[in-house]
Amino acid sequence: MKVKILVNNWTFKGGYLAEHGLSILIIKDGKRILFDCGQTNAIVKNIEKMGVNFDFDAIVLSHAHYDHTGGLKFLVERTDCSIWVHNGFFEKKFAKREGEYKFIGENFEGLNMARFKIVNEDVYEIFDGIFVVNATSGKESNEFYILKDGKFQSDLFLEEQSLVVKEDEKIAVIVGCSHNGIENIVEKVEKCFSQSIFAVIGGFHSKDFQQDDLQKLCQFFKEKRIYKLVPLHCSGIETLIYFGNNLPNKLKVCGVGDVIEI
């Protein structure tokens, strides 16, 4: 299994574009799964720079925020694969900032809606050994909202899904933004698959964590039999530093253009 970072908030390689967003290509047994699409056409430029073609077998979108879906419109004419989302994906997304509601979703008008495959199950196998997993927390947000029936409601991120890839008795978990809690997602995967996780890759949503929160997260991962942690995107640089000091044997620092072999 190979994991290629196509969009992320940072890069350590010349010639690549970094942006606030996430996109990861997973290659397993000849299947090429694109997980999230970043927010701009940076994904196209990084794909071309990396020498990766657009012949994807599936696109999986973790949730409907712009920094994970904005790049989709630059890909739909370059690939004809299905786009996998979870039920609730098309709710209108907002963030409340300085007392005002700001739209932070994406407009999917003009796209061929028949290409979207809507998953209703908590765990669904899209290809052999490749699953989408929905883990909800029921926790209300004070920052993120959806507009439903003309009213703003706290966003419970009921549509948020992660990608779980099994190969040679190893499990890799690819997460988007972990709005429902990275701990919650990890424990849901462990419960559903009845085995420990080899690697967790993606956005841990910890960029605004205080020291106490980072300490708790670090302790959580210390107690888990997880071999590699690859925080990206909304994890934030502070998480990389804290994990580097406290989980040096588990942390792998990656950016746009990097390839992880599992």
Image: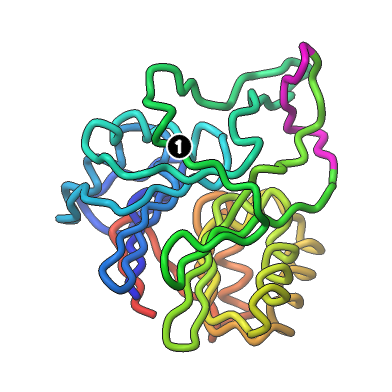
Q: Residue at x 22, y 41 (%)?
A: 45
* 142 shown above or below 256: above
What residue is pinned by disc 1? 116
* 83 shown above or below 242: above
**Residue 233 drawn at (x, y percent):** 51, 51
* Along the line of sight, the residue nearer the viewer: 215 or 184: 184
* Along the line of sight, the residue nearer the viewer: 228 or 17: 228
* Along the line of sight, the residue nearer the viewer: 234 or 6: 6
Which quarter of the picture shows residue 249?
A: bottom right
**Residue 203 drawn at (x, y percent):** 56, 55
Q: Residue at x 31, y 44 (%)?
A: 81
Q: Answer whether residue 8 is magenta in the image.
A: no
* 67 shown above or below 49: above
Tag 1: amino acid: Phe
Q: Residue 184 vs residue 2: left or right?
A: right
Which quarter of the picture shows residue 219?
A: bottom right
Q: Which region is colored magenta?
A: 140-150
Q: Residue at x 49, y 88 (%)?
A: 169
